[in-house]
Image (cartoon, helix red, strand yellow):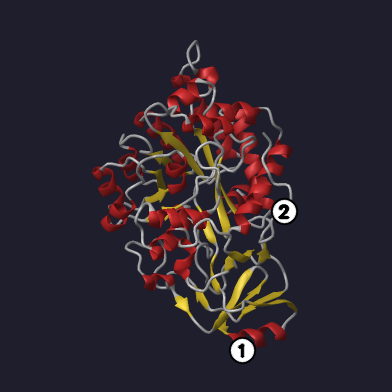
Amino acid sequence: MADRDAARRGRGGRGSGGRLALVNAGAVVTGPPPGAPGPVRFPTREHLGIRHGVGIGVEDGRVALIASDDEVGEWFHAGVPDELVDCGGRLITPGLVDAHTHAVFGAPRLDDHARRARGETYQAIAAAGGGILQTVADFRGRGEEELLLLARGRLAWLGALGTTTVEIKSGYGLSLEHELKALRVIAALGAQGPLRVVATFLGGHELPPEYRGGARSREAYVRLIVEEMLPAVAGAGLASFCDVFCEPGAFSLEETAAILGAARERGLGLKLHADELDPSGGAELAARLGAASADHLGAISPRGIEALAASETAAVLLPGTLLFLGAAHQAPARALVDAGAVVAVASDFNPGSSPSGNLPLMMALAVSQARLQPEEAFVAATANAAYALRLDGGAGRLRAGESADLVVWNCREVRELAYWYGMPLAWRTYAAGRPCHALEPGISSPG
């Protein structure tokens, strides 16, 4: 039970001793007020919790106080001081929460990118040996230590860009052996820190090549997930959630419901890749099952919007994916917010359709392409993203007594985060009080 609890918290390897004080900030954004726990529907500027003339004291990885600079200074010197940071009028916010990534993989898919530029379809690229199955073949040929080294470098990128919490999915193994390998790598990333890591099992990502025709069928693979993979994953406490790619050509509504029903029986939270390419009812299924989130939603139907708005299921939008794929449209973020859905924004960092973990860039795309307001995009990448992962403990907010996940930005106003698109705005990033703002050398993925 202890191992499972640790996997759910995703908190191993986080926190530091000593006292850290951040003073002389231009503004501190604390997030939704203490009287408004949980998700934020209809976000406004008031939900940002903007405060002026205050600093932050951090001790043992947690926020000790948010008070005037004088009070923070007195507190700092009264104990065992570690580091006093003059923020020089910069903005401080909660660390960003990336609620959807596939960051554990091997090589990039450079050929896919070139083929799309020539006008080839997703189906044609997959038929030519590209797509997810190319990554699966590459992933299966790599050992855990190599995958861990690659993923650790990528998380350093994310931290340097202002992300302090990241969800990571399996789904490139598509066999019991290799899915467990992926989840062990994810667990090691969480144990090493400093970022908070949430693990999601995505055995239902694609049909593996050995189950395409012949004696082994898609029904047999669904049984494998339900009868072997899920018991092993849940029994080892390696994941907080189970996800399924619910889409025509991937897994049907019925197959998705069967997998997620078995996951719920094993104590896992539920997630869906839903309505990415076609309005197939994935959002409605997510709402009906009480899933933590329905992700993608590029082709969600009006009924799907209504279903999510009436539910506790978060709508996780991935604007970088549709941009990178050259889609002519984005998910209907404006309609989702106006209907009252809980809207989050994530990167979908993966080697095929969104090779970027730059969450401020995704916020900028959510504003310029999907018509969110900057304040809505910020809430979507912090408090609402934490809700999509069912996290407490201060994720997406700054609260005394909670984890010191925060960013000092090279700007003075929160709306700038979604304005200077693609620019490296994070000046200092702290995950549970530990610095993670320096990029390590040599982080590139092998070809």
Please say whether residue 123 is visible from this viewpoint. Answer: yes
- Compare marks 1 and 2 and give the one earlier in the sequence: 1
Residue designated by label 2: 440
Element under disc 2 = loop
Sort mark 2 into few (<14), some (14-19) or many (20+) by Cα contacts within 10 Å: few
Between the residue at mark 1 and the residue at mark 2, the CA separation in whole angstroms equals 35 Å
Circles 1 and 2 in contact, beta carbons < 8 Å: no
Residue labelled with disc 1? 70
- Residue under the image location 46 percent in, 47 percent down: 320
Q: Position of residue 399 (x, y in %)?
A: 52, 72
Report whether 156 appears left or right of 324.
Answer: right
In-image side of 296 versus 16 (left or right): left
The structure residue drawn at horizontal position 62% and vertical position 84%, both measured from the top left corner, is: 72
Using the rendered image of the protein, determine whether residue 271 is visible from the camera's viewpoint.
Answer: no
Q: Examine the image and state in which quarter residue 183 appears.
A: top right
Indicate whether 344 appears above or below 185: below
Image quadrant in which you'd find residue 33: bottom left
